[in-house]
Image (tube, rainbow, N blue to C red):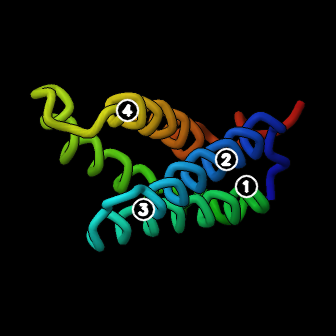
Amino acid sequence: MPTIAPFWPRMLWSAAVYNLVIGLAGLFVPGADTNARIVALLVACFGLVYAMVARDPARLRQVLWAGVVGKLGVVALLGPEVLAGLAAPGTGWILLGDLVYTALFLMFLLIGADKLTAR
C-alpha cells in the first residue's frame, strides 16, 4: 500500500464534515417535507462514507466514485433551478462546494498512486 500524502486525508475529512453539516442541518429545516429530509439524510450518509475513506484512503479510494457520481448528479439536477432563480437560497453555494469536492475527488482517483505518496 502506498503512503498517502497528508493533504488527501485532510481533504477527505473536510468533505466528510461538509456533507455531515449540510445533511444534518437539512434534517431540521422547518417545514421540510419527508422527501427533503430523506435527501438530507443521504447527504449526511455520504459524509460518513467520506470519513471512512479518510481513515484508509489507499484501500478505500475507489469508493469515491460514488461521491463523484452523486455530486455531479446533484449539480445536474439542481443547477438549472439555481440558474433560473427557483432554488432555495444558498443552494448555489452548496453546488459550488460539490463541484470543488468533485474536482478534488477526481484528482485523487485519477492521478497515479506514486503521485499520492508522501515524499
Q: Quadrant of the N terminus?
A: bottom right
* Disc number lying in front (2 or 3): 3
Q: Mark 1 to mark 4: distance in Å?
A: 27 Å
From the viewer's perspective, is residue 36 above or below residue 112? Answer: below
Amino acid carrying label 3: it is Ala
- Element marked by disc 4: loop
Which numbered circle lies on residue 12? 2
Task: Give whichever of discs 2 and 4 has the lower sequence position.
Answer: 2
Which numbered circle lies on residue 40? 3
The residue that disc 1 covers is 54
Q: Position of residue 106 (x, y in %)?
A: 48, 40
Horizontal relation, residue 14 to residue 80: left or right? right
- Element marked by disc 3: helix
Horizontal relation, residue 86 to residue 1: left or right? left
Please tell me which residue is depicted at 32% across the width and 33% down the height of the picture: 89
Task: Give whichever of discs 1 and 3 has the lower sequence position.
Answer: 3
Q: Mark 2 to mark 1: distance in Å?
A: 5 Å
Task: Give whichever of discs 1 and 4 has the lower sequence position.
Answer: 1
- The answer to which image quadrant residue 33 occupies is bottom left
Q: Position of residue 47 (x, y in %)?
A: 58, 59
Q: Mark 3 to mark 4: distance in Å?
A: 15 Å
**CB of mark 2 within 8 Å of CB of mark 4?**
no
**CB of mark 2 within 8 Å of CB of mark 1?**
yes
Horizontal relation, residue 115 to residue 72: left or right? right
The residue that disc 4 covers is 90
Q: Mark 1 to mark 3: distance in Å?
A: 21 Å
